[in-house]
Image (cartoon, rainbow, N blue to C red):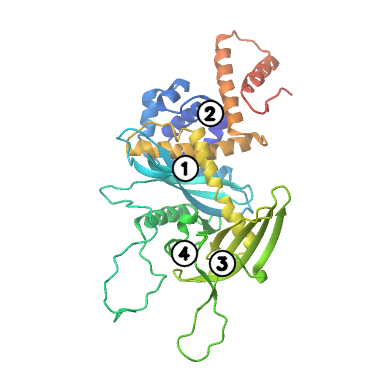
């Protein structure tokens, strides 16, 4: 299939010709096969050069998936003039057995409970214009290892407080700079992944913001991101004790007050109101507020955006508190950039549903890492091949239906005698490749 070879030609700088040929065979099998994505399944759908042993050797080889993903994204998916963000999230893959590398019990939001699984941290490049996330690298999170890689996901280092009998501040204690924080193992792990991604991108595009979910709604995570020379956009808890900066005049007695009135989420000042919307169908009134506020645990003032919703029929209310360390960022961008973080969830969905992230049965560290990164690379590859074909609104299911049909057409023509009726060949090809597709794109002109 020539379009696959064309898309993979740019990877010659980061892969040997042998591995590039093996990857081409594996991609052809992934696009055309049905059912569970396993090594044995791929070998059954592969052309010459895709034996089971060859596929095994591929998955037990070491690759720099950050370079592979970035070369592909740079050549096929980057657009001039677009705004890009860096985003992160974790994905949990359920696994049974006892021998899979990194197997432990992790919380799954899909199952809403702790399950036996493995976990990966994903760092993705998010295109604001096309509103898509392009995964850069997937790194496995291991709770316990001989090297002490990741102990937990907590973003705050817990220390046992020193006991003192007298009330108030202990004698001899000094002021602490909240910008100098001790990062937890998970934050160090995440910081390393961010720095590697930024180093690989190497100023090809300007990235200013890092987007993460509410797990990074604390000072430790914010300082970690700022150490990477980025600004963070995340979410705070809905009951966060925020304070307005003190605007009272100093009376000349005592310490100057820094914190002003504490926020009342039910009575937000109208002077901070930026936008009001009303949904006639759902009877929901939405108000968006933006203000600069302070928090006792953060080292600096925060750019706060509060989305306040009220049901006009039941009068029930709810609110979301977003924040950014960039005090000059407009509220529309904070809301938009944070909502784009959810595009990473679509990466996980496609990787699990179509490209084998939930199906693989390898247990060794290298093979597990290759399977996870190949499944997310296929998300990028599917974007690239659909772009090459210029098919609007084309889904992954349509793409796989096309290659599945093309596989059958190829095998059928091997059994037929030679003939020169090109029009008949095109009609047969288009008819078969549209089987199972949601939208039939391939038609004879």
- Which of 161/299 is in front? 161
Badge nearest the viewer, 2 or 3? 3
Badge nearest the viewer, 2 or 1? 2
Residue at image mark 4: 226
Mark 2 or 1 closer to N-term?
Answer: 2
Residue at image mark 1: 68
Q: Contact (CB < 8 A) between labels 1 and 4?
A: no
Mark 1 or 4 closer to N-term?
Answer: 1
Q: Residue furthest top?
A: 417
Mark 3 or 1 closer to N-term?
Answer: 1
Image quadrant of residue 425?
Answer: top right
- Mark 4 Cα shell of 10 Å, populated few (<14), some (14-19), many (≥20): some
Q: Left or right: 339 with respect to 202?
A: right
Where's residue 240, x and y in %? 50, 64
Badge 1 marks a residue whose secondary structure is: helix
- Mark 2 Cα shell of 10 Å, populated few (<14), some (14-19), many (≥20): many
Query: Marks 4 and 3, Cα distance to the nearest angstrom?
Result: 15 Å
Query: Marks 2 and 4, Cα distance to the nearest angstrom?
Result: 41 Å
Residue at image mark 2: 31
Q: What residue lies at 69% left-to-right and 48% top-to-bottom?
A: 282
Above or below residue 182? Residue 422 is above
- Which of 230/172 is in front? 172
The quarter of the image holding the C terminus is top right
Mark 4 or 3 closer to N-term?
Answer: 4
């Amino acid at each position: 299939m020539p379009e696959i070879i064309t898309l993979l030609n740019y990877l010659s700088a980061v892969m040997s010709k042998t591995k590039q040929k093996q990857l081409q065979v594996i991609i052809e099998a992934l696009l055309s096969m049905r059912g569970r994505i396993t090594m044995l399944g791929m070998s059954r759908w592969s052309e010459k050069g895709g034996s089971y042993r060859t596929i095994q050797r591929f998955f037990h080889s070491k690759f720099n998936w950050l370079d592979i993903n970035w070369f592909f994204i740079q050549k096929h998916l980057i657009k001039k003039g677009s705004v890009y963000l860096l985003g992160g999230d974790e994905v949990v893959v359920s696994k049974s057995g006892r021998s899979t590398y990194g197997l432990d019990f992790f919380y799954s939001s899909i199952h809403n409970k702790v399950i036996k699984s493995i976990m990966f941290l994903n760092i993705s490049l998010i295109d604001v214009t096309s509103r898509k996330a392009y995964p850069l690298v997937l790194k496995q999170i291991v709770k316990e290892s001989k090297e002490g890689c990741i102990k937990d996901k907590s973003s705050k280092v817990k220390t046992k407080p020193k006991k003192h009998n007298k009330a108030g501040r202990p004698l001899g204690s000094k002021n602490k700079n909240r910008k100098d924080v001790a990062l937890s193992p998970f934050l160090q792990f995440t910081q390393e992944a961010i720095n590697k991604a930024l180093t690989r991108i190497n100023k090809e595009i300007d990235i200013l913001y890092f987007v993460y979910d509410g797990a990074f709604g604390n000072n430790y995570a914010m300082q970690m991101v700022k150490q990477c020379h980025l600004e963070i956009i995340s979410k705070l808890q809905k009951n966060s004790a925020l304070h307005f900066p003190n605007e009272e005049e100093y009376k000349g007695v005592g310490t100057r007050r820094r914190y002003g009135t504490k926020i009342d989420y039910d009575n937000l000042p109208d002077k901070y109101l930026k936008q009001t919307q009303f949904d006639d169908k759902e009877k929901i009134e939405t108000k968006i507020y933006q203000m600069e506020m302070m928090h006792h645990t953060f080292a600096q003032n925060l750019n706060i955006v509060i989305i306040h919703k009220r049901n006009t029929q039941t009068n029930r209310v709810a609110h979301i508190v977003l924040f950014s360390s960039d005090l000059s960022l407009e509220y529309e961008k904070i809301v938009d950039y944070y909502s784009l973080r959810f595009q990473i969830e679509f990466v996980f969905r496609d990787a699990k549903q179509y490209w084998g992230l939930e199906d693989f049965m390898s247990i060794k560290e290298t093979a597990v890492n290759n399977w996870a990164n190949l499944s997310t690379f296929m998300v990028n590859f599917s974007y690239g091949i659909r772009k090459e074909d210029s098919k609007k609104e084309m889904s992954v299911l349509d793409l796989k239906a096309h290659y599945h049909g093309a596989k059958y057409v190829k095998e059928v023509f091997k059994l037929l005698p030679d003939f020169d009726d090109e029009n008949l060949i095109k009609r047969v090809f288009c008819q078969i490749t549209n089987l199972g597709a949601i939208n039939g794109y391939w038609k004879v002109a």
